[in-house]
Amino acid sequence: MSRQDFKYIWLLLKDIAGREKKTIISIIIASVTAAVAPYIRIVCMGMLLDGLYQGAEYEMLFGYMAAAVIFSFFCKILESRTSEWFWQKEDYTRELDSRELNRKSFVMDYEYLEDTHVQELRTRAFARSYFGIRGWLLLQMKGILKNILSVLIAVMIMVPVLMETKAVHNMSAFRWVSVMLFLVTGILIWKNYRAGINYTRKAEEILDTLDGIHNKSNYYLDILSGVESQKDLRINRQQAAIEKDVEALFQRSREGEKSMGRLYIRRQLTGVTISGLSGFFIYMFTGFWAYMGMITIGNVVTYASSIVKLTHGASDCAVGAGHMKSVALYARDYIEYMNLKKRKLEGTIPMEKRRDNRFQVDFEHVSFRYPGTDKDVIKDLNLSFVIGEKMAIVGKNGSGKTTFIKLLCRLYDVTEGCIKVNGIDIRKYNYQEYCALFAVVFQDFNIFAFSLGENIAGAKEAEKDRAADALTRAGFGGRLKELPDGLDTYIGKEFSKTGVAFSGGEKQKMAIARAIYKDAPFVIMDEPTAALDPLAECDVYAGFDKMVGEKTALYISHRLASCRFCRDILVFDKGQVVQRGTHEELESQEGLYRELWRAQAQYYK
């Protein structure tokens, strides 16, 4: 492990310790007791054998046995209680990771959500370990601490035994045999340690290849369980293609699991073989010392058992060190994700409160390109308008209409230039107060699997009369009366057996009702009706215009007739406003608007 690996583990451990001090303490206690308990039995057994060999009194022998039982029982109880606490905490560490990652998603700049690298960080930080990154670290830390303590205790037991050895008549032969046995035992211990390291490294390589397979399998699991996706799959007869791909993924996953199985068996065989040989030479080593009169029979048991424990502890430490390497990689991704800095300027100026809801908006030499790209989507845009009027933005797909709305709502900040409201750069306003200006129905709007009231209010508790009024104004009033649970009706059956599967048109009305409920000064319709036919879209836009009353409304569409009722129409093309005026003015002059209007006119006859 590198210095950076230790840094990431230390930062994650500090985060855990700051939240769960008792868990850290319980891990330390559980590790100490798990390491100490076997040696209590080993030492007491050695003393018991020496006592029997030397003809000690039964009271003393009984005392050795009682001490072994009592101390082992005490350690077991203590270990069980602390481990129980530890496992209780383990059960929720994945949920804790999920909560923290979700919280970060709520507050990070919007542009990060469309950044592939950032989303890969999130996926890897939450991947592979059943217990989550914190739980995986705690589990490995518990095992490594136990094994390190086991090795240290073994050394502490062996040193006094070595100190008690007596001189023999052929010391040179004794030393030669002792050194040889010691070297062979040491080499076997080192081999077992290296085998543990290699096993972990190869296992990580196999798991890395399985990550992509599991990600794709999980994606299929999601879409194949969805009602909406199943409609498209069945109608378009895509089941066979997906089934073939799923089968291929299964075979690749199976091969990966087989490789893991073969690797595990090799590791176990290697471990058993090396452990067996180590045990054989350890007992030869200690038996030779006993034969030479250097140690007692009891010391043979104590010494040999301690070396065996040391061997296993060193090997398990190697495996744990490999796992800690993976912990460090996950911790790196998690910490990088959680430490993503805000790029948006956090303004402090409060928004002006105006009863007439009229605000002057100015785009001054605004250019914008999405992060990671070198092509401007908006190019040197200069534009002024007053919020408090009806305005439409039209143009071909990809002309920059939706990007214009993202910049106005400050989901993204401009690359060059600035946007001003009432003469002040919008980056200087309090962000939450600025966002409160807008109620937007996006073209890819989402209705969540919450209750109807929660969806409309955007909060756990909805003002029932206000929510019902918004739904009625959006054309959902009749359907609302038919629902036995009213606003408490769940959307879909993900969280409630009594949930209702609403149609796309009904969900569209919910999205519109949500915008009405917010009661913001500025309402935007960003092509949420693109799936409807042109005439139906016209009806929805005209109806929505009546709903918002005197509020500002900005309508976006690539269908010109949907917005012809607006007195101010902006025509976008390649990130710029190429025409502006009323429908009559634009249709009467040469330009993109008339070209599009004539191309689409057939749909309105």
Image: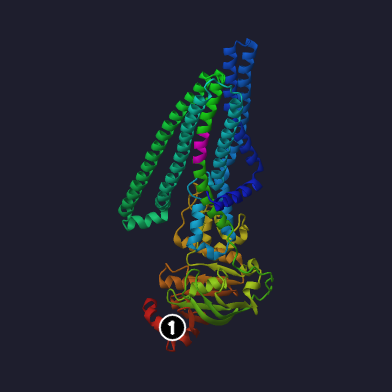
Depth order, front residue of 212/160: 160
Rendering quarter of residue 147: top right
Q: Position of residue 190 (x, y in %)?
A: 48, 37
The question of residue 561 being in magenta is answered with no
Residue at image position (47%, 73%) is: 374
451 sits left or right of 20 in the view: left
Principal secondary structure, stretch drawn in magenta: helix
Q: Dividing the picture into quarters, in which one does residue 202 lie?
A: top left
The image position of residue 540, as x and y in percent, is 48, 70
Q: How is the image coloured?
A: rainbow
Residues 502 and 108: in front is: 108
Q: Nearer the viewer, residue 225 or 463?
A: 225
Which residue is outermost to the bottom?
A: 589
Chain part drawn in magenta: 312-318
Position of 411 relative to 88 (above/below):
below
Q: Secondary structure at mark 1?
A: helix
Instruction: Identify residue for label 1.
Output: 593
Residue 369 visible at all: yes
The amino acid type, in three-letter code, at marker 1 is Tyr
